[in-house]
Amino acid sequence: MATAFQISIGEYLQTSYRPDCEYIDGEVRVRNVGKWEHSRLQYLLSAWFASKESEWRVLGATEQRTRVTPTRVRIPDLIVVRDEEQPDVTIEPPLLVVEILLPDDTYSDTEERAEDYFRMGVSTVWIIDPKTRTGRMSDRTAWTSSPRLEVSNSPIYVELPEIFANLDRSKK
């Protein structure tokens, strides 16, 4: 279970945590940290996006502080942004936010996180479940399960079977 404590947003933004913590309405929340499968999946997705950055004219980052409201800072597993200079804390809506589920994640927590991203103006959120080897994407109107996750009106996509095959290969 995550623990939390209270500080100001200014103090939070000036403090480094290991692992980094989220800031939700005055409360610093220690978040669940991924184990091997989660970390490996995050690495494989990062490698996928890194190989496409020039072609798609985007940049990707993992566990980047993302200020979704004046009083909330989330730390998505992965974001994809336009290929331009970025601040230390992301304040413009990413093109894509990717969350990788952990065994301890609850549906309500995941839904709250997605809603924060949508309120910020993020156009697409992907939730990937390493346990079931599935992914869902949403443009806020509906959640769709698919082996190919995409960002509408962009070249951005991922082929989950290819990513999961590499994840499974690492178990041998």
Image (spheres, rainbow, N blue to C red):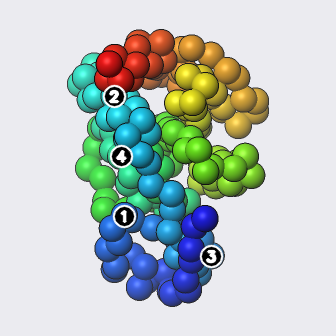
- The residue to which callout 4 is attached is 62
Q: Where is the C terminus found, in terms of image quarters?
A: top left
Front-most of residues 66 and 92: 66
Q: Where is residue 108 in the image (x, y as percent from the top left)?
A: 74, 52
> Which residue does the image show at 35% across and 72% down from the upper left?
17
Give the answer, above or below, for where 88 lies relative to 41: below
Q: State how far apart marks 4 and 3 are (Cα).
A: 23 Å
Marks counted in the figure total 4
Q: Which of marks 1 and 4 is nearer the N terminus?
A: 1
Q: What residue type is labelled 2?
A: Leu
- Residue at coordinates 40% horizontally, 19% vertically from top-left? 168
Q: Can residue 163 be seen in this view?
A: no
Q: Is residue 52 visible?
A: yes
Residue position for label 2: 44
Identify residue for label 1: 19
Helix, strand or loop at disc 1?
A: loop
Residue flagged by tag 3: what amino acid is it?
Answer: Asp
Look at mark 3 in the image and give the residue it sits on.
Answer: 25
Mark 2 or mark 3: name the one nearer the start of the chain.
3
Q: Mark 4 or mark 3: which comes first in sequence?
A: 3
**Amino acid type of the residue that numbered disc 1 sits on in the rendered structure:** Pro
Q: Is mark 2 on a helix, strand or loop?
A: helix
With respect to residue 139, does 27 lie above or below?
below
In terms of sequence position, does the residue under pointer 4 or pointer 2 come before the other? 2
